[in-house]
Amino acid sequence: MAIQKIKLHNFKKFETLEINCNEELNVLIGDNEAGKSTILQAIDLVLSGSRNKVESIGLSSLFSKQTIKDFFTDKQYENLPKLFIEIYLTEQNNEFLNGKNNSETRICDGLKLVFEPDDEASKDIKEILSQSDDNFPFEYYTIKFYTFAEQPYSGYKKYVQHLFIDSSQINNEYATREYIKSLYNSLLDGKEKNKHFNEYRRSKDDYVEKVLKDVNDKLESEKFVVQTNSKSNLEADLNISDNDGITIDNKGKGQQCFIKTKFALEVKAGLRELDVILLEEPENHLSHLNMKKLIKMIQTTHNKQIFITTHNSLISSRLDLKTSILLNSNSNQIMRLNNLENDTAKFFMKAPDNNILEYVLSKKVILVEGDAEYILMEALYKNVTKEELVDSDIHIISVGGTSFKRYLDISKILQIKTAVIRDNDGDYEQNITDRYNDYDGVYIKVFADSDNSRSTFEICIYQDNKALCDELFTTPKRTLTIQEYMLKNKADVAFELLDKKANEISVPTYIQKAIEWIKE
Amino acid sequence: MDKRVIFAVAGAGKTKTIIDKLSLEEKSLIVTYTDNNYSNLKQRVIKKFGYIPENTKIYTYFTFLYSFCYKPFLADRVKAKGIFWDMPSVETLKLARDKPSFYMTKHKLLYHNRIAKLFEQMKTNNDINSRLEKYFDNLFIDEIQDFGGHDFNFLKEITKANLNIMFVGDFFQHTFDTSTDGRTNQSLHKNYITYKKEFQKMGLTIDTESLNKSYRCSQTVCEFVNNNLKINIKSQRSDITNIINIENEEEVKMIFRNNSIIKLFFQKANTYDCYCINWGKSKGQDHYQDVCIVLNSTTLKHFKSSTLHELAPSTKNKLYVACTRCRGDLIFIDEKKIKSII
């Protein structure tokens, strides 16, 4: 059992989103607000089949704000938006899952959660819409859990067994209880559960009869019993403990997260198997060592589909980056390396992992050619803006060459605002204007000196800071010109400048423009 | 791939034939027309396996149409809310066949006798056949004689599917005319010979031999049916039972109050306070010993002049159903006599 594809429509930040999934591991990488958790939540809602869960979150928080806003431009009944989450499954040989009732009208197995206006209440809805203020008729929407064969399903009759481990909820008593309950429920079928409940109740009766008898015998009309009801039954009393008898709620946050995940992954044969495990930011509360253990565990798990959200580079780079799902808060689309153009994908698979991760996790990026620019950029930024770079949401990435286009291909998809600062290498027309013609736009701008004689970063720095450089780099024995010296010792020169004259460097115009643009 | 239709006589073991073919290895779908027969089939499957195996599905015809065929392919597009069980008004026959109102009431209930037509209109039949092939090895349809109108055309489409098919039915037990619609297959049931030819055209093997003898009805009852209704039926049994015509008021009272003898009325059985049911409704029932047939004025006239075979076909078929419910004695009473004692 595996999820093949997830489709969201008008769900939270995603007006439309389609994610093709891997049969085993799916790592969702993105910065805060990128939508990672939204995707996990979507999967969780559909698989749970729980109307209660949906209602307690509320339709208004699940509906795309933009969609609702757009609707109010004309407020026509027939334009009332519909929200759906579709989960396409691998072939299950189950007629109740198979049908054409999906947005692709394709015959396949799957589940869907649909919110749509209740046509039977159309009169009331029209009335609400005719009011002058913008009042959205959430209350008149129906919540439907259907298979693609248009068969209803619910928490009691589920087609996929899944578990959601949310480490941000750790230490919350309710969440721990829910976790234990859902784990227990996902591992046992109804018959076994009934047997457990029954035996548990009987053992309580037994206790009353054998132990409480002492005191009850001395009482006249009333007697003591142990209660059995919805607040006091097996499900309510269950806990998870280790071999030493320490229960999960008495462990540290980090341990709790680790144990929960371990427990879910290591379910032994004989019990009903979990099909899908959803892990929300497992790095929270985990020590480096436990994190490594967790990664190992995930890597060696088979026959289960795992979805992990993370913004931790250790997790994402150790788990297969190639198949990771990348998200950015600027964009409502996702990206995977394997749907980039072939060359670009290959490039990033070879490039140091951290570069692409850092890029993807950023809102705004300045891409520079090499170490010298990288070293000095912080100082240049401060000189232009009078602000510290660390206080901004701008990241500097050294590309180590001129393979800017690779990054720009990603920006095109994820809409990461990117300023490229590069040398004109003696031919502005060819190296800048012609080369980046297809990329320049709202999210991408390329900055270089337009004067072909000012062909590199060092030349520009020298020419704009002659006095300063001469003072700094002139030694009695040096036979090279200062500019030549600077070109031959790029990194050393940059360090020296940063160290001694950081605040005095005057910034070449093209870099100044780049900084101003990215900061907008 | 075996595709056949077996024409049986009443009480010859149609259900048994289907049940015997079921196994835990092959995936089978059984479709039947009436609710009676649906619960009967379910019980028989449970009797055979001790439970209903996962590979065996039993659907009434309309559950099959709606849940297995309509929902997976058309629910999103057509958005019906259920089935409308009355006949559509004649006016609707004038509507174009691509108009939703031809298929649905204004409250979005599908006319039960046009669901099959909807599949033709929406070109869903190939998908339905693939679905049958995907989930089943064998398809059994019981009470095949009750398919008429668009449903009979749908049957023709289904037979193209690539799986084993066995239809069983008894031409003369055709008593429902609920699936007719305008002129579609209007004269299908007029003539047994042309009826059988329709199945031949579908490429089915026609089997009129294996179920031509009744286990339920005695030789006496079979002879009565042969001679009076002119419907061919033989018996597996050699014992003799009685055909009794009761006129004595006391005896009528006794039979009327005897709750071990079912009283079968042509219609309106529910207006009588006794153990009774309508002729047509008794179809599929297999547990009566002696049976009392109550004759109204028309049927009594034909009964007395030995011209029961001249009754309107649908009445004749219902009477055939009623007579063949009987394992023991067949008792006839004039409806007027019953009215006079209550």
Image: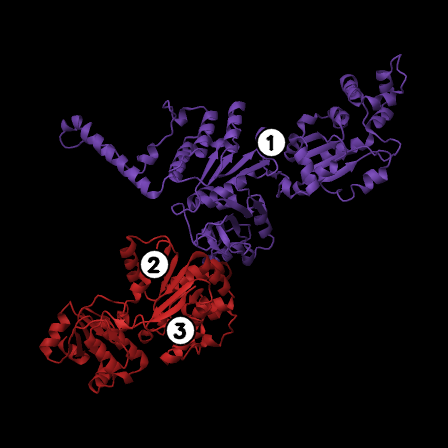
Chain colours: A purple, B red
The span from disc 3 to disc 2 (Cα, nearest Å) is 27 Å
At label 3, the amino acid type is Gly
x then y, percent, for residue A492: 78, 19
On residue B22, the disc is 2
Q: Closest to the observer: A294 or A87? A: A294
* Location of residue B78 with respect to A182 vertically, above or below: below
Q: Are marks 1 and 3 in contact (CB under 8 Å)?
A: no
- Residue situated in front as seen by the camera: A72 or A245: A245
Quadrant in the rendering for residue B217: bottom left
What residue did someone put label 1 on?
A317
Residues at discs 1 and 3 both on one chain: no
Please report the residue visible at 44 percent of the width from the left and 44 percent of the height from the top: A160
The residue that label 3 is drawn on is B148
Q: Read off the chain for label 2.
A: B
Do the residues at pointers 1 and 2 share their chain? no
* Left or right, residue B258 beside residue A518: left
Q: Secondary structure at mark 3?
A: loop
Q: Is residue A462 visible?
A: yes
Residue A274 image-quadrant placement:
top left
Under circle 1, the secondary element is helix
**Image coordinates for residue A231, horizontal then vertical, percent:** 32, 36
Disc 2 residue type? Leu
- Disc ID at residue A44: none
Residue sitting at the far bottom: B305
